[in-house]
Amino acid sequence: MQQANTPSLWLDRDRVEANIRRMHEHLLGLGVRLRPHLKTCKSMPVAQMMQAAGASCFTVSTLAEARYFHAQGLHDLLYAVGIAPGKLEPCAALMRSGCRLTITLDNLTAASAVAAAARQHAVSYRVLLEIDCDGERAGFAPDTKTLIQAARILDQAGCEVAGVMTHAGGSYHCRDRDCLRRAADNERDTTVLAAQRLRAHGFAAPVVSIGSTPTASFAGDLTGVTEVRPGTYVFQDLVMVGLGVCTADDIAISVLCEVIGHRAEHGELIVDAGWMALSRDPGNSDQDGQCGFGLVCDLAGGLLDGLQVRHVNQEHGVIADHAGRAIDLSAFPVGTRLRILPNHACATAAQYAGYHVMAADQDQNLYWERCSGW
C-alpha cells in the first residue's frame, strides 16, 4: 500500500466475506432467497464470493453489467431499472444469447412499448411490475387499476408477467431501528398486496421481490416475499453506519490518498483525493454531520478520531476536525498516506476501474477489475 498510486480503491476481502455471510444467513433464516444487487461491486470475483455463500441469481442496474456478468457465467439476471424503450432490442439480444433476463416497468406506456417489441423481435420478455411502496421512487400503486392493465397488455403480447418488485428508498431517511423495521414491514406488505391483486385477476405472479440493504437487514418477517435484493451490504458504507445497519469496522472499501499540503492557518490537511476520487455524495450529512465526505483512517485502517473530509474540489480534499479543533499538522507531514471510508460505497467505487485487494492470509495484494458504463 505504501507503493501504490494515489488515489486508489482498496478492498478488504475478509470484511467482504463477513458481510456476505451475515446477509445470506439472515435471509436464509427468514426463508427467502437472496438475489444480490451487483451495482455496488460490479466485479466478478466479488460475485463469485456471493455464489460461494449460496447466491444463484443476481440483480443489475445497467445493461453493461448484464452483458459483463452474463459473459462471466451468471445467467439469471434482473435488470432492476424501469425499462427504456430504446433498450428493448439489446435486452432481446441478451435473451437470445441464453441470458434469463427479467426487466421491470412501472407505467402503461412502457408496457405498450414492451408488448410492441415482443411482437417485433419475436421474444417473450419476462417482466416484473415495479410497485411504489413509499413514495420515494417510481412504481404502480398496489391498488391501482393501471397495474392490472399493464399486466394484461404484456400478457396479450405473449410476455411473462413474473410478478412484482419494489425498493424501499424511504428507509434511508430512518433514524432508528423501529423506523427501519416499519419500513421493512411496509415494503413487504405493499408488494405482497400487489401480487395478490395480480393473482386475483388471473396472473400467476410467482415473484415478490423487495430490496434495499437497510430493510433487508432489519426485516423480521418476510411472509409472502420470494427474494430480496440488497447491494450495499457487500461493502457497507458510512450511510449504513449512520442507519445502524453496521459499524465502521464492517466497511470493506476505502480510498488511499496522500497528504499534499497543509492549511496551516486553519489546522487542516490537503490530500490528493477530491470528488473525483470520493464522489460528491453527502451521504449521511443529515444524520449527524460528522462524516463530511468521508471519515479518515490511518494506513492500517484505524479511524483517526474526529477527522473528516470537510470539503472536496475535483482533485483536492480538505481534511479537518469535525469539532473545529486544529489538527496537529506535525503528525501528518506531506507524504503521509491515509485511507478514507466512503459515504456511499456505490458512488465511490464507481470512480475506479478496479480494486486493490488485501486480506489477512494474502502475502501480495491482488487487483480485481470492475465493469463500467451503461
Image (spheres, grey):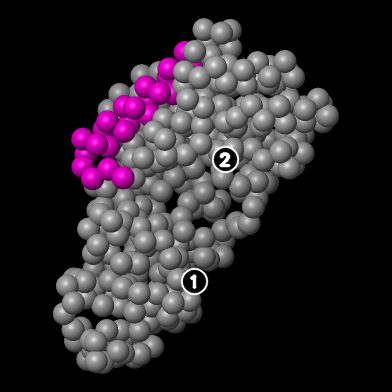
Whole-angstrom CA distance, mark 1 to mark 2, is: 25 Å
How would you classify the magenta stretch by its main secondary structure?
helix
Question: Residue at point 57% right, 40% down?
Answer: 81
- Mark 1 or mark 2: name the one nearer the start of the chain: 2
- Helix, strand or loop status at disc 1: helix
- Label 2 neighbourhood size at 10 Å, few (<14), some (14-19), many (20+)? some
| Left or right, 344 with reference to 73 | left
Q: Residue at x 38, y 78 (%)?
A: 317
For residue 147, which numbered disc appears in the image?
none
Where does residue 174 sit, x and y in percent of width and height? 27, 43
**Taking 297 as reference, is 24 left or right?**
right
Where residue 208 sits: x, y (%)?
48, 23
Q: Residues within 10 Å of mark 1 (few under 14, many from 20)?
A: some
Q: Which residues are magenta?
A: 173-196
Report the amino acid beneath label 1: Met
Up-down relation of residue 251 to residue 318 (above or below): above
In the rendered image, the quadrant that contains the N terminus is bottom left
Residue at 39% x, 53% y is 235
Residue 103 image position (x, y, % from top left) = 62, 33
In the image, taking residue 2 as reference, residue 117 lies left or right, namely right
Q: Secondary structure at mark 2?
A: strand
Image location of residue 281, percent across then percent down: 41, 61
- Give the left or right position of residue 129, taking residue 14 as reference: right
266 to 367, vertically: above or below? below
Q: Amino acid at mark 2?
A: Val
Disc 2 marks which residue? 81
- Whether residue 29 is visible to the viewer of this picture, yes or no, is no
The foreground one among 184 and 225 is 184
Which residue does the numbered mark 1 point to in the structure image?
A: 276
Q: Nearer the viewer, residue 201 or 234?
A: 201
Can residue 179 be seen?
A: yes
Is 221 included in the stretch rendered in magenta? no
